[in-house]
Amino acid sequence: ETAVFQTPNYHVTQVGNEVSFNCKQTLGHDTMYWYKQDSKKLLKIMFSYNNKQLIVNETVPRRFSPQSSDKAHLNLRIKSVEPEDSAVYLCASSTSGNTEVFFGKGTRLTVV
Amino acid sequence: GEQVEQRPPHLSVPEGDSAVIICTYTDSATAYFYWYKQEPGAGLQLLMSVFSNVDRKEEQGLTVLLNKKDKQLSLNLTAAHPGDSAVYFCAVTASSGSWQLIFGSGTQLTVMP
């Protein structure tokens, strides 16, 4: 049963546009993440965030930024998308001290 | 840093046969191990988690073996059925304070009726 909800499911946009993806978790977790899954299905962490700390994978381009209004929400904003940003973006959450991470269904971004 | 290799990339088995997926990791401090399943158009479903003090764990037709000496983690699906067809990922993390999962490259499992 899904408890990490992502919208939209799909998004097609042109190079240079700004996009924003939403994520909400109803598990009561205090830590949320964004992962990128490329066309070869490889998964890489982008961000980890709780109310105390944002950790950024140093390989993530600066046009990507997470935005959080509360511990249940972590959105992902991409300023000026580029073709290599085409991927599936997976949101996830966990509880501090518990390493089990639960994922949403993902948002597939296509940049044309 | 930690690296995780997963094999095979593709695996096809007849219905009723077993399927084995293997991951090797590099960091001996790795403490937590996971298997995830991803069906088409879906997110990652957590199948099993194992702490490093466990060598074997069985749940609902799945067996996870952890060989710390060889730094190897395996998933065995006994009596696979077509509904098991999906991409399977192993993942590891060093400690409860670690902020990220390190994933294997995935195995596309096809179970033929």
Image (cartoon, coloured by chain):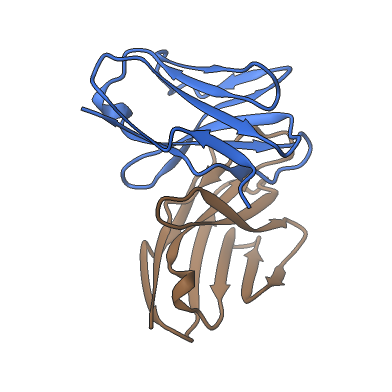
Chain colours: A blue, B brown
- Extreme-bottom residue of the structure: B16
Would residue A31 be found to the left or right of residue B13 on screen?
Answer: right
Question: Residue B9, position in %: x, y?
Answer: 36, 61
In the image, residue A62 above or below residue A35: above
Residue A48 position (above or below residue A27) = above
**Count of marks, rendered view:** 0
Q: Give percent across and percent down for residue A43.
A: 45, 42
Q: Residue at x 71, y 40 (%)?
A: B95
Q: The C terminus of chain B lies in which quarter of the figure?
A: bottom left
Residue farthest to the left?
A: A112
Q: Quadrant of residue B39?
A: bottom left
Could you tell whether B109 is left or right of A53 in the image? left
Q: Position of residue A90 (x, y in %)?
A: 49, 37
**Farthest residue in the front direction?**
A8
Q: Nearer the viewer, residue A104 or B34?
A: A104
On screen, residue B3 above or below B86: above
